[in-house]
Amino acid sequence: MVQFRNIVLICCFLLECYSCGDQDGRIATFNQQLGTYKLDIEQTDLGTYKKDSNFYKDLFITFSADSSFVMNKKVPFLYDSIGTWVAGNVSEWCWMRFKSFPYPNERNTGSQFTRPYSKGTDTFFLINSATPQDGASTIGSIIFKKIKRT
C-alpha cells in the first residue's frame, strides 16, 4: 500500500511540474507577444485583396498587457478590429477572439496564431486562416512584423 501511495505522489508531482511548465510557457509567450506589429504585405498573400495593398500596408495590431488587442482599422479579412487574446505555450496555438463574433464556447475558439518567431533580426507572428467578416474571402496566412514593444 505504501508503494502504491508513493507512485501516486510521484505521478501527482510530475503532473504538477508539467502544468507549471505549460503555464511558464504561456507567460513567456504572452510577454513576447506584447507590442505593435505591422502587416507584412511582402510575406502575406493577400489574394483577392492584393489590388488594395496600399490600404492594407498600414495595418497595425497592438497586443496589450490586459489581454486585449486593437487594430488601427477594420479590414474584411479579419472579423473585427478589437478583441481579446490568449497566449499558448510552445506546443499550442495562441487565440484571437474578435469582440463582435458570437463564440459558442470560451476555450480554443477564435482565430489561431503563432507565438512570435524570429527571422534574422526581425520578429513575426502568423494568423492561420483568420475569421473574415461575413461574406469576405479568407486569407490562409496573415503575417505581421513587430515594430515596437509596449
Image (spheres, rainbow, N blue to C red):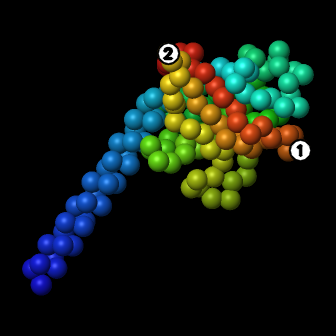
Q: CA distance from mark 2 to mark 1?
A: 37 Å
Q: Residue at x 50, y 48 (%)?
A: 92
Which quadrant of the structure image shows residue 104? bottom right
- Nearest to the eye among marks 2 and 1: give it: 2
Q: Residue at x 47, y 48 (%)?
A: 91
When the figure is inspected, residue 144 is found, relative to residue 127, above or below; the finding is above
Element marked by disc 1: loop
When the figure is inspected, residue 131 is found, relative to residue 73, above or below; the finding is below
Q: Nearer the viewer, residue 134 or 9?
A: 9
- The residue that disc 1 covers is 135
- The residue that disc 2 covers is 121
Label 2 Cα neighbours within 10 Å, binned few <14 / some 14-19 / many ≥20 = few
Q: Residue at x 60, y 39 (%)?
A: 113
Residue at far front of view: 120
Q: Position of residue 16 (x, y in %)?
A: 28, 58
User: Is residue 83 visible from the viewing direction of this image?
Assistant: no
Q: Position of residue 107 (x, y in %)?
A: 56, 55
Element marked by disc 2: loop
Which quadrant of the structure image shows residue 83? top right
Amino acid type assigned to the residue bearing label 1 in the image: Gly
Q: Nearer the viewer, residue 119 or 98?
A: 119
Looking at marks 2 and 1 on the same chain, the residue that comes earlier in the sequence is marked by: 2
Q: Position of residue 1 (x, y in %)?
A: 12, 84
Q: Position of residue 101 (x, y in %)?
A: 73, 47
Amino acid type assigned to the residue bearing label 2 in the image: Thr
Disc 2 and disc 1 in contact, CB within 8 angstroms: no
Q: Is residue 77 left or right of residue 141?
A: right
Label 1 Cα neighbours within 10 Å, binned few <14 / some 14-19 / many ≥20 = few
Q: Residue at x 85, y 40 (%)?
A: 137
